[in-house]
Image (cartoon, rainbow, N blue to C red):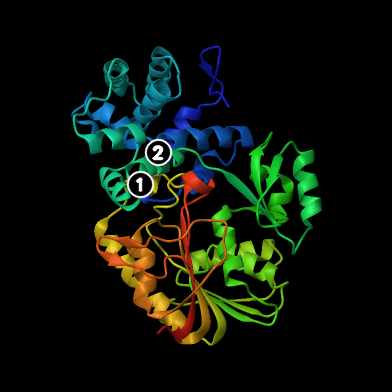
Amino acid sequence: MSARSNGCDVIPTQEISAKVLSLVEKEGISVKTAIAKFAGKYDYKIRGSVHAYSIETLKRLNAIDYFLKNSAPNFDSLNPFVKNLLRIAVYEMKYKNVHPALATDSAVRIVKKRNVKFAGLVNAILRKVEDMEIESNNSVENVALTLFHPEWFVSYTCELLGEEEAKKLMEANLTASTYIRVNELKSSVESVVKYLEDNGTVLSPTFMDEVFRVESYERHPASLEWHSKGKYVVQDLASCFVSHALNPSPDDTVVDLAAAPGMKTSHIAMLMGNEGKIVAVDNSPERIRRMRSKLRQLGVKNVEIKLGDGCSFNFTADKALVDAPCSSTGSYATQPNAKWTFDWGKFRSTISVQRKMLRNAMRNAYEAVYATCSIMFEEDEANVKNAGAEVLRLNTPFSRGIREFRGERFDDWDKVVRSFPHLHNCSGFFIAKLNERKGE
C-alpha cells in the first residue's frame, strides 16, 4: 500500500516503520512483534505496508547506512527514531523509486511533529544522499553492498558454494515465498483451499499434500478469519518437511527438545492424528505460554508441555526432534535483522548448545531428527559428524549436504538434506535423521 495520496500521508507509514525499526534495534525482537505494538490498532492494509517498509529497509541496511554514514559522520550517535526515519527515507529514494524530493519532504514533515530542531539536519543529510552512489574498489565489499549482506557472509558463502551460487543465494534472500500448511486437526485440505481461493488467494501445490505455495493474494492469508481459527498456518516449506522427516506414528512417544513456538510440534501432532504422546520442552516460561496458546488454537490434544533445558532434559521416547537454536543464516529473507546481529562468539556458544542437545536426544530416543535454519557447515554437517550416530538416508526433493568444507569431510553428505532459497524458493534448512546405533 502506498503511504501517500496526492503527495500527502494518509497514514504515517514511514513514522510507524521508524518506530518499529527503533524497537527492533533496541530490543532485538522480531519485526512482527514490534509491529504488533505500534501498528496493531490499524487495519491489515496499514500493518502490511508497515511490515513491507520495515522488512525491505532491514534487508538493505548495510547499503542504506553506507549512504547515511558518508553523509553524516555522526550518524551512529543520532536519536534512534531520527536514524531510522532517515533509513526509511533512503530506502524510498534509492530502492523504492520514490522521488527524492518526496522522500525528503515526508521525513522532514514527520520529524517536525516530534522535534523541529532535527528538521534541518534531516533535510541536509537526505539532500547529500540524493546524488550519492556506492563506490568500492574492494570486491567483497562491493558484493556486500550491492547484494545487501555482511562481508563475512559474502566470503563464507563464496567458499561454501562458489561465487556464482553464493550470489544467487544472496539475491534470493531479497524475496520470500509464502506457504500455508493446512491444519487437518481442524479442517480438510479441500475446505481450506476453497476458502483461500474464494478470498482471492492463488495457490499452487507442493510435494506435501497439506502444504501450498501462495502465488498471490488480495489479503494476506495470515489476516483472514480461518487463520485466526487455526484451520491453517503460515509456515515455510522446508520447515514443514522437518516433521515429515521425523515420520511420527500414532503410537509413538515423541519429544521435541526446543519446541516453542510450537509450529513443528503442532504439525507432528497432526501427522499423529492427535494420538500417541508428544513431550514439548522449552526453557522459556514466556515462550511456553505462547506455545500453549498456539497449540490450543490449533486443536492439539496429545502434547505435554514441560519447562526444561533440552541439553539435559531426561526422557524416554521413540523419536526426538532437535530443531536447534541456530544462527538463522538460512532465514535472512524473512528475518533480515539476523544478518546484522550475527556474532562469532555467540555462534560458537550456540554450536556447543546444539551438540549437547543432539547428544541428549541420542541418549534417550531410538531415532532423532536434527534440523537448523542455517546454511553454516559448522552447525550442520559438522554437528552430525560429531554426534557419532548412524545417519539414516532421507528421501527428499531438496538438495544434499556438503561433502567437504575447510578440510573437514562429511562422508554422509548424500543422506542428509539441505534446502536453499535460490534453488527451492524457501528458507535454507539442514535436516538429518540419526539412529541410536553407532555407525561402523
Residue for point 45% across, 50% down: 331
The kind of residue on which mark 2 rests is: Leu
Q: Is residue 396 visible?
A: yes
Q: CA distance from mark 2 to mark 1?
A: 9 Å
- Neighbours of disc 2 within 10 Å: few (<14), some (14-19), many (20+): many
Instruction: State how many labels appear.
Output: 2
Question: Is 103 situated left or right of 247 in this image?
Answer: left
- Neighbours of disc 1 within 10 Å: few (<14), some (14-19), many (20+): many
The circle drawn on residue 126 is: none
**What is the x, y in percent for residue 117?**
29, 22
- Which residue is the site of mark 1? 339
The kind of residue on which mark 1 rests is: Lys
Question: Is 355 situated left or right of 295 in this image?
Answer: left
Viewer-nearest residue: 78 or 382? 382
Secondary structure, mark 1, is: helix
Question: Is 277 situated left or right of 167 in this image?
Answer: right
Residue for point 63% across, 69% down: 268
Q: Quadrant of residue 22?
A: top left
Does the residue at mark 2 contact the one at mark 1 (Cβ under 8 Å)? Answer: yes
**What is the x, y in percent for residue 175?**
49, 38
Instruction: Give the answer, above or below, for where 65 lies relative to 423.
Output: above
- Which residue is the site of mark 2? 58
Residue for point 41% across, 75% down: 357
**What is the x, y in percent for residue 119?**
32, 19
Dot placed on the residue nearer the N-terminal end, 2 or 1: 2
Q: Quadrant of residue 132?
A: top left
